[in-house]
Amino acid sequence: MAETDADTWTVAGRTFRSRLIVGTGKYRDFAQNAAALEASGAEIITVAVRRVNVSDPNAPMLTDFIDPNKVTYLPNTAGCFTADEAIRTLRLAREAGGWDLVKLEVLGEARTLYPDMRETLKATEVLVAEGFKPMVYCVDDPIAAKQLEDAGAVAIMPLGAPIGSGLGIQNRVTIRLIVEGAGVPVLVDAGVGTASDAAVAMELGCDGVLMNTAIAEAKEPVRMARAMKLAVEAGRDAYLAGRMATRKYADPSSPLAGLI
Amino acid sequence: MSLALTINGEPRRSLAVTIAALVAELGLKPEKVAVERNGVIVPRSTLAQAALADGDVLEIVHFVGGG
């Protein structure tokens, strides 16, 4: 299976083996987070940018547990509801970490955490002009995805269901249409609840899957992280293998000739 | 004469002359944070030269867990 071993994907000129990107929120503690990351095999993690707790400067920090030199930190703009907020956040992130590969999300409302595509597109244009490489959380709209790509998004990341909902991939048709039309990597970002959901995303031809809550809120996050690793690999292999056609009725697997 | 500053939304007085000195006074590691003053990012390489002024509004951020 040498061809599987060599199966990599590339975003903004950077090549990765793992097609799973994991978040770092909602874990019990940093140690559990680091253990889950290890089990997931992920090479990229999303991180948020927040104010330092000035009253407790010695509180443990994420970077003490997950080495930014070994894992690619992907700063996000979670919690930003305007292009200006998101751009400000990523400028700070670049200064704090020195990374230009970022995850842009501009939210439209708190109830659904659906992206505001007008603000998202605006932010994408500004960030690209400033030299950022934005991977962009977006709606499952093939036209919007194309507009983002034209604006310079280095990856398109449509939701499979609302953030944190765990509802699974609700939009297989539109995800597939986005995959077919995209010239940059497509990753399902949000909606995965369990391993089979990740496999579905990969079977649709996505280049990867990004998830946080499905692992962090599992009863055993480290075990679920491993399950997600395997599911992403299985889904990818199934996509590459090319699934059988479906039939309306049964078709025997054993030969009919030579029956006694 | 201490300066009246606003740091991460909280009023605070400091005797620090530069942003680098302020970061050290707060017990933070400069290589792990980013600083914005009055809405403008202060490049890390210039923190030691960035003189503080009375009334400065500073945001000091770092990376935390997130999805």
Image (cartoon, coloured by chain):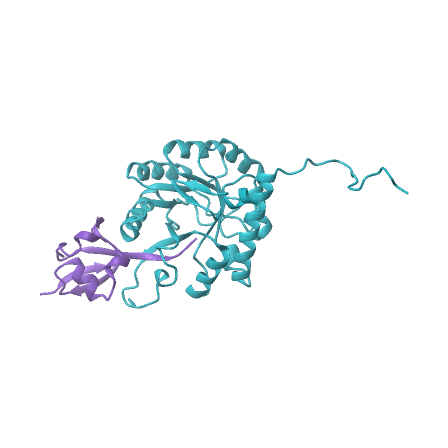
Chain B is shown in which shade? purple
Taking A154 as reference, is A41 above or below it?
A: below
Q: Which residue is found at the position 51% from the left and 35% from the top?
A: A179
Residue shown at the point (77%, 41%) measured from the top left: A253
Q: In which quadrant is the N terminus of chain A drawn? A: top right
Can you see residue A170?
Answer: no
- The quarter of the picture where residue A223 lies is bottom right
Residue A256 showing in the rendered view:
yes
Residue A246 location, x and y as percent?
Answer: 70, 36
Task: In the rendered view, tell whether residue A232 sits above or below residue A33.
Answer: above
Q: Is residue A255 left or right of residue A4?
A: right
The percent position of residue A64, horizontal first and vertical second, equals 35, 63
Chain that appears cyan:
A
* Nearer to us in this view, B60 or B7: B60
Left or right position of A255 against A138: right
Q: Which percent across, then down, holds residue A155?
A: 42, 39
The image quadrant that residue A56 belongs to is bottom left
